[in-house]
Image (cartoon, helix red, strand yellow):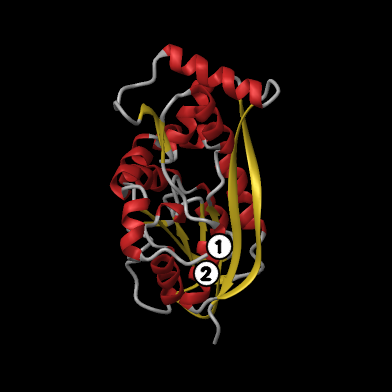
C-alpha cells in the first residue's frame, strides 16, 4: 500500500486544534476516563530496552503520568503536548519534570537532542506519518531509540458496525494503517525493530460512556455527522441495541494499536 502524501493527509486527518481543544477540556478527568490508553502506554513502556537514558522525550505527554514513568530511566525527561490544558495538568502533577507545548510534526528542538523518544496514542492525529517519523529521526541522537504506540485503521470496528446497522451517523475520525506507519519509518531512514499490532478492547455498561470515551481522546463525538446535532435518545438506544446484539450482549469498543520499536543508526 502506497504511503499517503502530505497534501492528501490534510484531507483525511482530523484538525489538530480540534483535538487540542478536546484534550484540554478533558484534562482534569482524563486519567479517570482513559483506562485503555493507560494500559496501552504501560505496554509500550514495558517494551523499552534502554536501561538508562540521558535525555528522553515523551511526545503527547498528556497529564504526565507516563512521562513520570519514563523519567525513572532517564536523567532528564521532557514531555511535549499540543493541548495547553493537558500541559497545565501535567505541570501541576509533576512539577519536577519539564513540559513544553508543541506539535509532533514540528518538534521544537535542534537535531540530535534525545537518546530516547517515547509516544503513546498520539501520533495517529498527525497529518503525515512521514513528517512525524522524519521529526523523530531528526531529534534522535545517532544510536538513539524510539518506542511508539499508534492507534491505526481497524480501531472501533464494533462502533462502526453498530452505526451501519442502526442507521446512526457519527463523526469518527479516520486513521492511517499500520502499513502507512511502517512505510513512513522506513522512508524516514529509521531502522525498524520489534513491531506488532494488538487489539485492546474497552468494555462499557452503556453506549453513552463509550461515546464520551472516544470524544475525550479526540477520536470523534456523539454528534450526528450530517446535522451536527447531538444524538437523540432514540439514536443512542438504536446504536446500543445493535452493538449489544452484534456483541452477544457485550458492549465493546476495540483499539487497534501498532507497537513499533525504532532506532536511528550511527
Q: Which residue is mark 2?
A: 183
Query: At which x and y percent is residue 165?
Result: 54, 26
141 horizontally vs 203: left or right = left
Residue drawn at (39%, 43%) of the image: 92
Q: Are marks 1 and 2 in contact (CB under 8 Å)?
A: yes
Task: Give the quadrant of residue 39.
Answer: top right
- Neighbor class of circle 2 (other Cα within 10 Å; few <14, some 14-19, many 20+) is some
Query: At which x and y percent is residue 229?
Result: 31, 23
- Neighbor class of circle 1 (other Cα within 10 Å; few <14, some 14-19, many 20+) is some
Residue reaching furthest top?
234
Q: Which residue is mark 1?
A: 179
Of the pair 148 and 222, the residue shown nearer to us: 222
Compared to 44, does 224 lie above or below?
A: above
Give the Cα distance between marks 1 and 2: 6 Å
Number of numbered discs present?
Answer: 2
Query: At which x and y percent is residue 58?
Result: 47, 59
189 horizontally vs 245: left or right = left
Query: At which x and y percent is residue 143?
Result: 56, 81
- Quick check: can you spot residue 68? yes
Of the pair 226 and 181, the residue shown nearer to us: 226
- Quick check: can you spot residue 206? no
Amino acid at each position: 500500500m502506497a504511503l499517503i502524501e502530505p497534501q492528501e493527509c490534510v484531507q483525511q486527518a482530523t484538525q489538530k486544534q480540534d483535538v487540542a481543544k478536546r484534550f484540554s477540556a478533558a484534562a482534569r478527568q482524563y486519567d479517570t476516563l482513559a483506562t485503555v490508553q493507560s494500559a496501552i502506554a504501560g505496554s509500550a513502556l514495558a517494551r523499552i530496552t534502554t536501561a538508562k537514558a540521558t535525555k528522553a522525550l515523551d511526545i503527547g505527554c498528556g497529564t504526565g503520568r507516563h512521562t513520570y514513568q519514563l523519567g525513572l530511566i532517564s536523567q532528564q525527561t521532557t514531555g511535549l503536548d499540543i493541548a495547553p490544558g493537558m500541559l497545565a495538568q501535567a505541570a501541576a502533577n509533576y512539577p519536577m519534570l519539564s513540559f513544553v507545548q508543541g506539535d509532533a510534526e514540528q518538534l521544537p528542538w535542534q537535531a540530535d537532542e534525545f537518546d530516547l523518544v517515547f509516544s503513546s496514542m498520539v501520533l495517529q492525529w498527525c497529518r503525515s506519518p512521514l513528517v512525524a517519523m522524519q521529526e523523530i529521526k531528526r531529534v534522535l541522537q545517532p544510536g538513539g531509540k524510539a518506542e511508539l504506540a499508534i492507534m491505526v485503521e481497524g480501531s472501533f470496528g464494533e462502533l462502526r458496525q453498530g452505526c451501519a446497522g442502526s442507521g446512526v451517523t457519527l463523526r469518527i475520525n479516520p486513521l492511517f494503517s499500520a502499513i502507512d506507519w511502517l512505510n513512513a519509518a522506513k522512508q524516514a531512514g529509521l531502522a525498524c525493530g520489534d513491531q506488532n499490532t494488538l487489539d485492546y478492547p474497552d468494555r462499557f455498561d452503556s453506549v453513552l460512556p463509550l461515546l464520551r470515551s472516544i470524544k475525550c481522546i479526540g477520536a470523534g463525538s456523539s454528534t450526528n455527522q450530517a446535522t451536527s446535532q447531538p444524538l437523540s435518545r432514540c439514536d443512542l438506544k438504536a446504536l446500543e441495541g445493535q452493538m449489544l446484539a452484534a456483541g452477544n450482549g457485550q458492549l465493546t469498543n476495540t483499539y487497534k494499536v501498532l507497537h513499533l520499536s525504532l532506532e536511528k543508526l550511527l
